[in-house]
Amino acid sequence: MSKSFRSIRGIHDGLTSDVRRWRHIEQTARDVFKCYAFSEVRLPVLEPTALFVRSIGEETDIVSKEMYHFTDQGGDDICLRPEGTAGAVRAYLQAGLTRSGSQRWFYTGPMFRRERPQKGRLRQFQQIGVEWLNVQGPLEDAELLAMAHAFLSELGLPSLRLEINSLGCPVCRPDYRNKLVVYLKSRTDCLCETCNVRIEKNPLRVLDCKNESCQAQLADAPEMASHLCNDCETHFFGLKQALDVLDIPYHVNPRIVRGLDYYNRTAFEIITDQLGAQGTVLAGGRYDGLVGELGGPATPAVGFALGLERIAMLLPETEAELPDIGIVAIGDSVSAYALNVAAELRKAGCSVVHCGGGSAKRQFKMADREHVRFVAVIGEDEMHSNHITLKNMADGNQETLVLNQVITTCLSG
Ligand code: ATP
Ligand code: MG
């Protein structure tokens, strides 16, 4: 016997109890997003590697070490998408939508990053992503956050915290970045190795290092919020004001940065303290430069993504949907008739399992194992009189009914 196969490290199977929760999350998202007039798109899992290098930025963790990419048989460099925004913007440009007003999109699907697997940190994980393209103002940022808030409230998730920040823009950020680099360089001895590499390449990312001793060094670090240009200041003020109007609680956290280069101005995370270091369940922000970066006309946009697995970890188990009816067919002579009864019941919307044939005892045992609510007993008498003996497994009561009555009973409970 060969050694049995295992899934790849950090890549998990979604078994039925997982999928039940995921579907609940997705359905809630669909229902809530519809009220904000967002529509679903389905985007490719495979994209050209260059798309992510260009949009996310070479110095980010994702591009520098986490992408699953390969050269295909035709010599093209192909990547399993590590995130959804770059592909969404590519699709938006490819479809020629830049002059069609604003687009409100959402999508759901797997993303791939070769990270160190931990609880809540997988190598294949699922996101629901939202992109609002061609919108400029802080009111839209607030509305997007209201949508995220409504979605999470609808799921009934406990103790979540919205943290917001402004990342400035190409006018004010360079000056801030320089100040931050000077500050960080004065503390290189006390910062972790990764942060030391980031000082030159991606200094803002040092701000959200998960290492506690690095965080301690950042207490007096200069903050973007006090270096914003007038336009960014006005935008940030407008966002906070709109959140107040919408009665959405938030904290300004100067340490919120995004790991991806294309973000500017508004950045936000929704965080739970129940998942340790993997506590960010939803994150996003404004990316006014990305459409231009990918070759389109300057087009402001804002979006977010949420991790399905992380949110699922916060939800209680949902009960499995059990079959309505088990068919117990007594004797070979009724098997064809019983098959037809099952087909009729299914046509009417009942969920039906056959209890495997053989002795009545064996079939009832199977009905028990399947946790069916009712058993339809079909023997020769039932077949000849065109009736079904329906046993309610909860109380043991039996009734002799015609097919339509069986259907009504099953669908009404
Ligand atoms: P983190 O700081 O946790 O690494 P991130 O900044 O890399 O998150 P984003 O790229 O903004 O995350 O992704 C949005 C959301 O997707 C995250 O808030 C999280 O819920 C989820 N997510 C990201 N990476 C993973 C992963 N490796 N495994 C599971 N979920 C993830
Ligand atoms: Mg990450």
Image (spheres, helix red, strand yellow):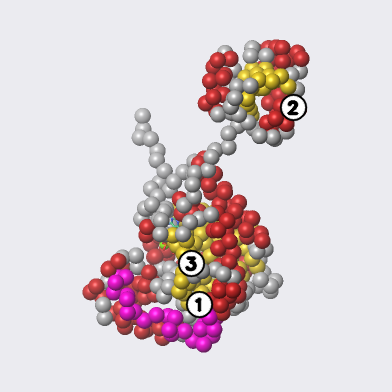
- In the image, 266 versus 260, the foreground residue is 266
Within-10-Å neighbours for mark 2: few <14, some 14–19, many 20+ = some
C-alpha separation, residue under disc 3 versus residue under disc 1? 16 Å
Of the 4 image quadrants, the one containing the N terminus is top left
Q: Secondary structure at mark 2?
A: helix
**What is the magenta segment's predominant secondary structure?**
helix
Q: Which residue is mark 3?
A: 162
User: Is residue 201 in sight in this rendering?
Assistant: no
Residue occupying image coordinates x 59% and y 17%: 357
Q: Is residue 225 visible?
A: yes
Q: Amino acid at mark 3?
A: Leu
Q: Which residue is mark 1?
A: 265
Q: Is residue 63 magenta?
A: no
Work out how far the residue at label 1 is from the one at label 2, CA to CA, in angstroms: 62 Å
- Looking at the image, residue 350 sits to the left or right of residue 128; the answer is right
Q: Quadrant of residue 271?
A: bottom left
Looking at the image, tell me whether mark 2 or mark 3 is earlier in sequence order. Answer: 3
Quadrant assignment for the C terminus: top right
Q: Nearer the viewer, residue 408 or 81?
A: 408
Which residues are drawn in magenta? 214-237
